[in-house]
């Protein structure tokens, strides 16, 4: 995309041929690659999985025993388990790669004499890179032209102060990864990609493992605990059987079979898959996830701190009124005082980005007889700063004519203009009346400063008050509904803005914010102690004239009060607070690069309703992970007990299951856990429940008890079928067939019943999940093949069941699971939460 601006005549940039030649010689501006190939890293990780180690051990024993069929089946199982791991990792990696591509920033370069916005990866050595306030520098280079340019190099040096630089500086270089604090610079690119200073550092950083989240830590502790139990049980079973039989291989097989039944290796895979695919779902809704760990926090958000302009409002500025100080008249309905519009335009950026400044440029064209902009060039700039803020621009022509114009918060402009008290009171009265209508107000002033030694602070210039401009930026059409959805989900809303109190309160009331009558400004907030600030934040929902330190203090106070904080922001000054919030949210269209860099999420369309979807997905992911884990616990219990009890109790057929049966069950449980439940729709009342405390135990004692009871009921049904079949005089193969069939069918029923721990199976069926239907049909088809295709049945040491036996297995499997529907019905009758 090319944009025409007034560039220095000597800067034309590379042409297309030079760009191609540079790319051919120096390559693309790509970040450094990890030192370990991702595929090799995954292979190493898979080989270290306990389940795979057990499979390899079992396979080796079968080969030693000469049982070639079982050995080759276990080899196939190793391939399938590894394939599933590769598939899951591939899905997760592709989702993350898509997120990274969406998150790729744009950079501005001069090529063919025009300013162009290009993907950062397309920057080449020799490019003329244009950087301005709030943007991140994406290559190393040297300054060739600048205007009041300063940069924060803390990413490299650790020093957070701004460094002023120009072409004549002792060090005129700029570095990738640093952030522009003020002004503008054009730099010749000299290093890109891993040749930059931060690229060299990045090679080491890429290999640093990110700390696990609280939920990951809980899951890891649970899995490690089960692994330790598995090792203990393996040793006990192996020793017991070895003493009984004196057969090393047979006792090892029995011990390994039980160990395989205990390991819940599906859970970590499920967690990674849920988070990665959840991020992809958010991306499809126009929400870019920069930090995947943020997905876990979304469902716990208790308060969202939002700015006003462009988030709550349309960010479409229309001028409603203009006050001219020269005749002390308020102009409306398209009759605009040229002097006020002219001064406000000169105080705006020459190439406007802000909608308000774009409007001022357009109005200047309509109200002036002669467009003076081509004759003037900026010679000095005071960026937006101060409490409250203002900004000043100094323009000159080639023959020395000068324009100095300032605009900003009316309080800031009035403070530097020193009006007579009567005139000041008149202006204050105008301000009050306009602010009550929800208008955004700016004061405008000019200066006749003649010298060349500009003061350090713009407030030191001698200003003359010119007037006021009042813009109306209406609330978005859907914002009331968005606020209502947040309130229904138990999420509080705070407006944190740099605008004045009266304007913000009027817009907040129009938007449907609760308790919009009271507001407090940043200075007053900063004078409070932490307990006082927390009490204020609990009571007040509107915070005005907020500066970076006040925003950061408010976020930290909320966090100290055990709130899980989401914050939206778009400006340079929002960076610290965005980074401090649990969930920092940058605007995709109007957000600066520094805001996007600090944030964890980016709303591509600047639409706050996307956060309602994000919270819903966060809650859905957490609920579905919990369902998957409870399913794994419930179905592992009957496998463990069906393998162990006949053995320890000395039943007629102690080896009812062998490793091939356990691995088959594991192969159908894995996809159910990590694919089917991930695709499960959100529960109907998920967004009407209060947020989940972020530090709470993943599974409460009650939830764990429910899963254990489910598993014990299934165990009772399966072992009941064992004893029934035995009482009917059936041989070991027929008993094994009935037990195995009952357990597989109970697994199918459990998959359906556990879709919700609150709503009935009928209600859950209305929420279509095609993957669940597919996995169930595949499971039933495989069971049929195992029972009724003789070679397959012979391999698994089972046999065909008659219709009566099949109905008994199905009936027992259903009853052992469907009792839970009565428990859920009782829960609904008592109107308890999920």
Image (cartoon, rainbow, N blue to C red):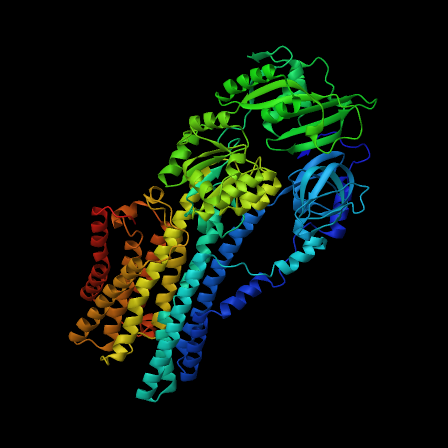
Q: Give the x, y percent position of residue 675.
A: 41, 55
Q: Looking at the picture, does residue 69 appear above or below residue 383?
A: below
Q: Residue 114: x and y, percent?
A: 73, 33
Report which quarter residue 597 is drawn in: top right
Left or right: 546, with 715 as reference point: right
Question: Is any part of residue 798 visible from this angle?
Answer: no
State the residue in front, 239 or 160: 160
**Residue 658, position as x, y percentages in the image:** 33, 75
Q: In the image, residue 829 lies at what x, y percent?
A: 20, 47
Q: How many marks?
A: 0
From the viewer's perspective, is residue 314 above or below residue 131?
above
Return the residue nearer the eye: 575 or 109. 575
Where residue 753 sits, quadrant-wise, is bottom left
Quarter placement of the N terminus: top right
Q: Is residue 811 above or below residue 597?
A: below
Q: Nearer the viewer, residue 677 or 703?
A: 703
Q: Residue furthest bottom?
A: 246
For this orientation, the residue located farthest to the right is 399
Residue 243 seen: yes
* Left or right, 653 with reference to 570: left
Residue 795: image quadrant is: bottom left
In the shown orientation, is residue 725 left or right of residue 209? left
Asked whether, in this view, residue 203 is left or right of residue 375, the answer is: left
106 up-or-down from 94: above or below: above
Q: In percent of the image, x 71 and y 50: which residue is there?
A: 192
At 54% from the left edge and 48% from the top edge, which residue is drawn?
290
């Amino acid at each position: 995309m090319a944009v025409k601006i007034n560039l220095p005549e000597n800067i034309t940039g590379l042409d297309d041929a030079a760009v191609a030649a540079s790319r051919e010689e120096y390559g693309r501006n790509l970040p450094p690659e990890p030192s370990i190939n991702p595929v090799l890293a995954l292979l190493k990780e898979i080989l270290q999985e306990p389940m795979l180690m057990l499979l390899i051990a079992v396979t080796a024993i079968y080969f030693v025993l000469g049982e070639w069929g079982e050995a080759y089946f276990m080899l196939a199982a190793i391939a399938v388990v590894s394939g599933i791991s590769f598939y899951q990792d591939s899905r997760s990696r592709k989702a993350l790669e898509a997120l990274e591509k969406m998150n790729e920033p744009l950079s501005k370069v001069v090529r063919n004499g025009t300013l162009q916005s290009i993907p950062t990866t397309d920057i080449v050595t020799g490019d003329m890179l244009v950087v301005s306030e709030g943007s991140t520098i994406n290559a190393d280079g040297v300054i060739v032209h600048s205007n009041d340019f300063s940069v924060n190099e803390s990413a490299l040096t650790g020093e957070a102060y701004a460094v002023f630089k120009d072409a004549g500086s002792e060090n005129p270089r700029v570095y990738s990864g640093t952030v522009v604090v003020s002004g503008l610079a054009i730099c010749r690119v000299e290093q890109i990609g891993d040749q930059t200073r931060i690229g060299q550092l990045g090679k080491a950083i890429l290999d640093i493992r990110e700390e696990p989240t609280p939920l990951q830590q809980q899951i890891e502790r649970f899995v490690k605990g089960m692994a330790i139990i598995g090792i203990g049980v393996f040793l006990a079973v192996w020793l017991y059987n070895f003493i009984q039989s004196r057969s090393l291989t047979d006792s090892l097989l029995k011990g390994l079979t039980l160990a395989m039944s205990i390991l819940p290796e599906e859970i970590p895979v499920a967690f990674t898959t849920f988070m990665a695919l959840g991020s992809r779902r958010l991306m499809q809704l126009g929400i870019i996830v920069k930090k995947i760990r943020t997905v876990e926090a979304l469902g716990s958000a208790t308060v969202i701190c939002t700015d006003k302009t462009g988030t709550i409002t349309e960010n479409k500025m229309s001028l409603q009124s203009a006050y001219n100080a020269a005749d002390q008249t308020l102009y409306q309905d398209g009759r605009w005082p040229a002097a006020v519009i002219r001064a406000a335009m000169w105080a705006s950026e020459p190439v406007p980005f802000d909608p308000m400044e774009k409007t001022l440029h357009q109005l200047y064209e309509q109200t002036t007889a002669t467009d003076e902009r081509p004759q003037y060039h900026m010679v000095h700039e005071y960026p937006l700063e101060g409490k409250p803020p203002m900004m000043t621009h100094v323009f000159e022509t080639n023959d020395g004519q000068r324009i100095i114009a300032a605009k900003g918060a009316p309080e800031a402009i009035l403070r530097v203009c020193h009006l007579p008290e009567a005139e000041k009171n008149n202006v204050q009265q105008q301000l009050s009346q306009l602010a009550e209508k929800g208008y955004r107000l700016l004061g405008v002033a000019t200066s006749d400063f003649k010298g060349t030694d500009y003061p350090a602070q713009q407030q030191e210039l001698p200003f003359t008050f010119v007037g006021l401009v009042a813009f109306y930026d209406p609330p978005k059409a859907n914002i009331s509904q968005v606020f209502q959805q947040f309130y229904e989900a138990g999420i509080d809303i705070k407006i944190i803005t740099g605008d004045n109190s009266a304007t913000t309160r009027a817009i907040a009331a129009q938007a449907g914010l609760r308790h919009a009558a009271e507001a407090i400004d940043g200075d007053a907030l900063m004078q409070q102690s932490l307990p006082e600030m927390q009490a204020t934040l609990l009571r007040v929902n509107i915070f005005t004239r907020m500066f970076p330190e006040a925003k950061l203090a408010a976020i930290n106070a909320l966090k100290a009060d055990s709130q899980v904080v989401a914050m939206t922001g778009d400006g340079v000054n929002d960076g610290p607070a965005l980074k401090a919030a649990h969930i920092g949210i940058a605007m995709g269209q109007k957000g600066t690069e520094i805001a996007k860099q600090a944030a964890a999420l980016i709303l591509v369309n600047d639409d706050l309703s996307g956060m309602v979807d994000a919270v819903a997905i966060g809650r859905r992911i957490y609920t579905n992970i919990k369902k998957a884990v409870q399913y794994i616990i419930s179905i592992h219990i009957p496998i463990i007990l069906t393998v162990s009890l006949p053995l320890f109790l000395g039943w007629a057929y102690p080896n009812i299951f062998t490793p091939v049966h356990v691995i088959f069950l594991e192969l159908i449980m894995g996809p159910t856990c990590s694919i089917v439940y991930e695709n499960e729709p959100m529960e109907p009342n998920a967004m009407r429940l209060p947020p989940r405390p972020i530090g709470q135990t993943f599974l409460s004692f009650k939830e764990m008890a429910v899963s254990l009871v489910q598993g014990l009921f299934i165990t009772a049904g399966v072992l009941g079928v064992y004893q029934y079949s035995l009482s009917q005089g059936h041989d070991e193969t027929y008993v094994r067939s009935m037990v195995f069939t009952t357990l597989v069918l109970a697994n199918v029923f459990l998959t359906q019943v556990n879709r919700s721990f609150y709503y009935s199976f009928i209600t859950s069926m209305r929420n279509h999940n095609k993957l669940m239907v597919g996995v169930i049909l595949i499971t039933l088809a495989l069971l049929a093949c195992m029972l009724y295709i003789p070679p397959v049945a012979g391999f698994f040491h089972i046999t065909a069941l008659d219709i009566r036996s099949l109905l008994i297995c199905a009936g027992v499997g259903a009853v052992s699971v469907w009792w839970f529907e009565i428990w859920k019905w009782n829960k609904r009758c008592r109107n308890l939460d999920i």
